[in-house]
Image: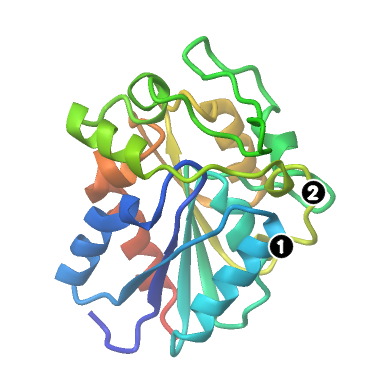
C-alpha cells in the first residue's frame, strides 16, 4: 500500500460510539492503512462538526472520511481541505437547506423500525430491544448487548437544523447501501447515493455493517483510498 495514501477517519452515528468501528480499523491496519476514529458529542450538528474538525487537525496529510448513519451529515459539513473522499456507510446525506430528519423520514419505514422521541431531558435514546430488532439484527446477542450498553443518545439539535452546501458536491463519494437496514430504508439510501453521484455498493446487510460485515465496509474504504491517492 502506498505510504502516501490517505488516513482513514471513521465517524460514528447516533446510538453508537467509536468502538463500532473496531473491526474495520483492525482490517485497515492489517493492510497498513492508517485509520483513526472520531468521537461526537451528538449535542448539535455544529458541535459534532467542530469535534470532527479537531480530529482532522491532528491528522497529517490527506484524509478519506467515513461516516455511518447520522455522521453522513457531519462528514459533509466539514470544510477541511484535507478531505479527498467521502465514504457513506448506510449514512444520511442531506442536501443544502435540508435537515437530517428530512432525509431520514423521506420514505416510510418498515414495522421493525423503532419509534423515536426525546426523553424528559431532550435526548433521543434507542430502545434496548431495537438493537436486536432493527439496529443490528445480524449481530450476535453479545454484540447487540455491547452496542446497547455503549449507545450515545442524540439531540434533536443534530437532526432539525438545515445543512449548508455539503462537501459531497466538491469531493468524490462512495456509498455502501445496506439492503437489510431497518433504520434507514434502502430506497432512501439509494436516493441519496444517486443524488451525490457516489460509487455505489449494495449488500444484504443490516444498519451496522461495521460490526456485522466489516470486510465489506473495509472493501469500500480501500477502494476510496486507492482512488484518492495524493
Percent of width and height locating residue 182: 46, 23
Q: Residue furthest top?
A: 111
Residue at 49% across, 30% down: 126
Pick whichever of labels 2 and 1 is earlier in the sequence: 1
Percent of width and height locating residue 120: 67, 31
Where residue 48 sits, quadrant-wise, is bottom right
Q: Is residue 221 above or below residue 190?
A: below
Categorize mark 1 by other alpha carbons within 10 Å: few (<14), some (14-19), many (20+): some
Q: Is residue 186 above or below residue 82?
A: above
Judging depth in this view, the residue of 53 and 157 nearest the camera is 157
Does the rendering let one see residue 76? no
Percent of width and height locating residue 102: 75, 35
Residue at 66% across, 63% down: 47
Q: Which residue is mark 1?
A: 46
Residue at 42% across, 46% down: 16
Callouts 2 and 1 close, C-beta under 8 Å:
yes
Percent of width and height locating residue 218: 29, 56
Categorize mark 2 by other alpha carbons within 10 Å: few (<14), some (14-19), many (20+): some
**Mark 1: which secondary structure?**
helix
**Mark 2: which secondary structure?**
loop
Give the quarter of the figure containing the N terminus. bottom left
Q: CA distance from mark 2 to mark 1?
A: 9 Å
Q: Is residue 197 left or right of residue 147?
A: right
Q: How is the image coloured?
A: rainbow
Q: Which residue is mark 2?
A: 161
Amino acid at each position: 500500500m502506498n505510504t502516501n495514501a490517505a488516513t482513514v477517519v471513521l465517524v460514528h452515528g447516533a446510538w453508537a460510539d467509536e468502538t463500532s468501528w473496531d473491526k474495520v480499523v483492525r482490517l485497515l491496519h492489517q493492510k497498513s492503512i492508517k485509520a483513526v476514529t472520531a468521537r461526537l458529542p451528538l449535542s448539535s450538528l455544529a458541535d459534532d462538526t467542530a469535534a470532527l474538525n479537531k480530529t482532522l487537525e491532528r491528522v497529517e496529510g490527506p484524509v478519506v472520511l467515513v461516516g455511518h448513519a447520522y455522521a453522513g451529515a457531519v462528514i459533509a459539513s466539514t470544510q477541511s481541505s484535507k478531505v479527498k473522499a467521502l465514504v457513506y456507510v448506510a449514512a444520511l446525506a442531506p442536501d443544502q437547506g435540508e435537515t437530517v430528519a428530512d432525509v431520514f423520514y423521506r420514505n416510510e419505514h418498515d414495522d421493525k423500525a423503532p419509534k423515536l422521541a426525546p426523553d424528559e431531558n431532550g435526548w433521543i435514546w434507542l430502545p434496548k430491544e431495537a438493537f436486536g430488532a432493527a439496529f443490528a439484527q445480524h449481530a450476535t446477542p453479545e454484540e447487540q448487548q455491547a452496542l446497547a450498553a455503549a449507545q450515545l443518545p442524540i439531540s434533536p439539535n443534530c437532526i432539525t437544523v438545515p445543512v449548508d452546501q455539503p462537501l459531497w458536491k466538491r469531493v468524490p463519494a462512495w456509498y455502501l447501501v445496506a439492503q437489510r437496514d431497518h433504520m434507514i430504508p434502502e430506497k432512501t439510501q439509494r436516493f441519496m447515493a444517486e443524488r451525490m453521484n457516489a460509487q455505489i455498493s449494495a449488500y444484504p446487510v443490516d444498519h451496522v455493517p461495521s460490526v456485522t460485515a466489516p470486510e465489506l465496509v473495509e472493501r469500500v474504504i480501500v477502494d476510496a483510498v486507492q482512488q484518492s491517492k495524493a
